[in-house]
Amino acid sequence: MMTGSFSAEHRQKDIMALTNPMNPVNPMPMGPWKITVYDQEYFQGKRMEFTACCQNIMECGMENIRSLKVECGAWVGYEHSSFCGQQFVLEKGDYPRFEAYSGSNSYRIERMISFRPICSASHKESRMTIYEKENMIGRQFEMCDDYPSLQAMGWFNNEVGSMHIQSGAFVCYQFPGYRGHQYIMECDCHGGEYKCYREFGSHAQTPQIQSIRRIQH
């Protein structure tokens, strides 16, 4: 239990450092990112534009985000404030209702409170290695493409013990066909190393990952 708590806290600190433009060691790059969020479905109600991260939309006078438009860059939205909870990859396009960004998530979620740019997204140059066990041990497979089914391409089970993102950013899904929980993996988040499933995200409960794709920028 202590290990899981530490891993989640470790990842959270890295994300907060990554989104801090005043961080002298690894400052968040400037643009080009732009997202417009609305507090009602179908782009109605209160409207706000952002070109940088937002830790809590409630502090901006909105109770929730019910539709949005990504005009530039790739983003990740979170169920809770401070980049916690379920993750939703947000690529260029319109999202008129929550189903549009939650995709085929088997868990009905109608809440997005924080969001940030995915600074390392680079569709053509994304590369990663997945490992059978924690701490980059066991059988491995290098990836630089999209895989709707890891088992169909030769991965031997429905779990990934750890992974290393060498370049770019990927979104990993719990089930085949890009369904279920989403986990955003970035090369510039704690060195691109995800040593156990507890580092996949604050909502990660198991190492189950069955499809992976590159994030469109």
Image (cartoon, helix red, strand yellow):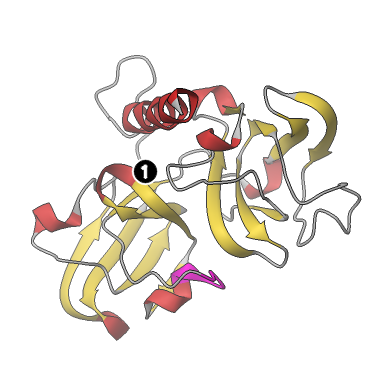
- Residue, x 77% and y 56% (percent of image)? 147
Rendered view: 185 above or below 64: above
Q: Could you tell me which secondary element the residue under label 1 belongs to?
A: loop
Q: Main secondary structure of the magenta part?
A: loop
Which picture quadrant has residue 11? Answer: top left
- Residue, x 77% and y 50% (percent of image)? 145
The residue where tag 1 is placed is 31
Rendered view: 18 above or below 86: above
Residue 158 in view (yes/no): yes
- Residue, x 72% and y 41% (percent of image)? 160
Task: Read off the magenta span.
Answer: 101-106
Q: Position of residue 115 (x, y in %)?
A: 33, 51
What residue type is disc 1 on? Gly
**126 on left or right of 153:** left
Q: Position of residue 148 (x, y in %)?
A: 76, 62
Rendered view: 95 above or below 25: below
Closer-to-camera residue (121/161): 161
Is residue 63 located in the magenta-colored stretch of the structure? no
Q: Position of residue 15 (x, y in %)?
A: 38, 33
Q: How would you rate the neighbour count of disc 1 (Cα within 10 Å): few for under 14, some for 14-19, many for 20 or more?
A: few
Closer-to-camera residue (25/10): 10
- Residue, x 18% and y 71% (percent of image)? 47
